[in-house]
Image: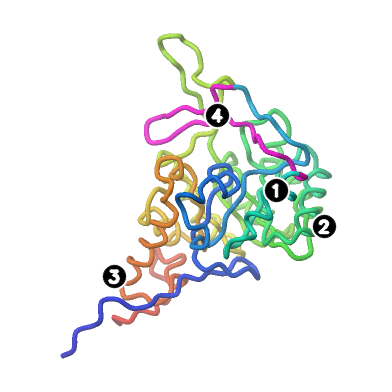
Amino acid sequence: MTTLKRYFNVDLTVQIGHLKLKNPVMTASGTFGYGEEYAEFVDLNMLGAVVAKGISLKPMEGNPSPRICETPCGMLNAIGLQNVGLKKFLKEKLPYLRKFDTRVIVNVFGNTINEYVKLSKALDNAGVDAIELNVSCPNVKKGGMIFGTDKKTLAGLIAKVRQSVNKAILITKLSPNVSNIQEFSRIAEDAGSDALSLINTIPAIAIDIETRKPKLANITGGLSGPAIKPIAVRMVWEASKSVKIPVIGIGGIINAEDAIEFILAGATAIEVGTANFVNPKATTEIIEGIEAYLQRKGILDVKDIIGGMDGTRPHNNIND
C-alpha cells in the first residue's frame, strides 16, 4: 500500500462578488495604515487584499490623546478615523499600493449620505477593487453608528452608493451593536451590497483606578482583539446563514486557527486587525497556517470548508 504524499498544492483563492482574491486573508481597516507602513515587515504581494485606513472627503485629525490602551485579551482605541483625506490618498497612497500584486480595498466614512456617495464615486473612478462602507465606527461624534444601527438609513445609504459605483465591489461593514444581525445583513444585501464584513469594534470603557479617570481622552473606545472573537464568530455564523452574498469575518483573529474558525462559521474571507500591532507578520503567518491546515486535513480547496461547522458542505478531500 502506497503512502499518501504529505504535501500537495491547495487552492486558496476565494471570490468576493466578481473579485477574485489569491487567498482569504486581508488586513482590517485602521490597523495596517495605508500598507506602506508595514511593507518592511510584510510582503504585500502575498496578501489577498490590503484594506486601507478609513478615508473621508477631507483630512481628519482624529480624537485627542490618549486614544489607545491595552485591556485583558484586547485593546481599546478611540483614534477617531484620523486620515489624510481623499485628495492626498488618491495622489500619494493609492499609487504606492498599486505597485503590488494584491487587491486594494478602501474603507470610507462620511457624516452624510452625500459624502459617502462622493467618496465612493471618486474611488470607483480611480479604479480601486472594492469599497468598504464604514457604517459602524463607535468613536466619532457624527455619522458613525447611526448609519449602521438604523434600518432605513442603512438601506438608503447603500442604495445611493450602489447607484454611484460601477466597477468596484461594494462591501458593507456592519455594526455589532444591533439586536438582530441577520435582519441588518439582509437589509444590506437587498440594498445592493456585494458582500458584508463584520464585526467592527464594541464600545467599551477602561478606568485608571489611581487617578479615577478614563484611560482614553474620548472616555469610550472600541474594544478589539481576542476578547471579542467568540461574539464575532457567532455574528458571522448568523449573517452567513441569512444572506447569499459573501461574508468577511473580523474580530480577534490572531493566528491561522482563529481564521479557520471564522471560515468554518461561514466567512469567505477574513480581516486581520489588532494582531498587526502585536505581530507585524501576522497576516502572512496566517496564510501559511491555513495552507498547512488544509494539507494536514487532505483538503484541496479552502472554499470547501466555508460554512463547514455543521458538516453540511461537501469536501474535496483526497483522503476520502
> Residue at 60% of width from left, 47% of height from top?
34
User: In terms of sequence position, does the residue under pointer 1 or pointer 3 come before the other?
Assistant: 1
Helix, strand or loop at label 1? It is helix
- The mark found on residue 77 in the picture is none
Q: Earlier along the polypeptide chain: callout 2 or callout 3?
A: 2
Residue 127 is situated, as x and y percent measured from the top left of the image, at: 74, 61
The first of marks 1 and 2 along the sequence is 1
Where does label 2 land, which residue? 164
Residue at 51% of width from left, 17% of height from top?
214
Counting residues from the start of the chain, the first of labels 2 and 4 encountered is: 2
Residue 141, compared with residue 239, is above or below; it is above
Q: Earlier in the sequence, mark 4 or mark 3?
A: 4
Left or right, 141 with respect to 103, comes to right
Q: Which residue is mark 3?
A: 296
Decide: marks 2, 4 in contact (CB < 8 A)? Answer: no
Which residue corresponds to mark 4? 221
Give coordinates of residue 21: x percent, y percent. 56, 67
Verify whether residue 72 appears in magenta. yes
Q: Callout 3 environment at 10 Å: few (<14), some (14 to 19), or many (20+)?
A: few
For the residues bearing labels 4 and 3, Cβ distance under 8 angstroms: no
- Reading the image, the residue beneath label 1 is 92
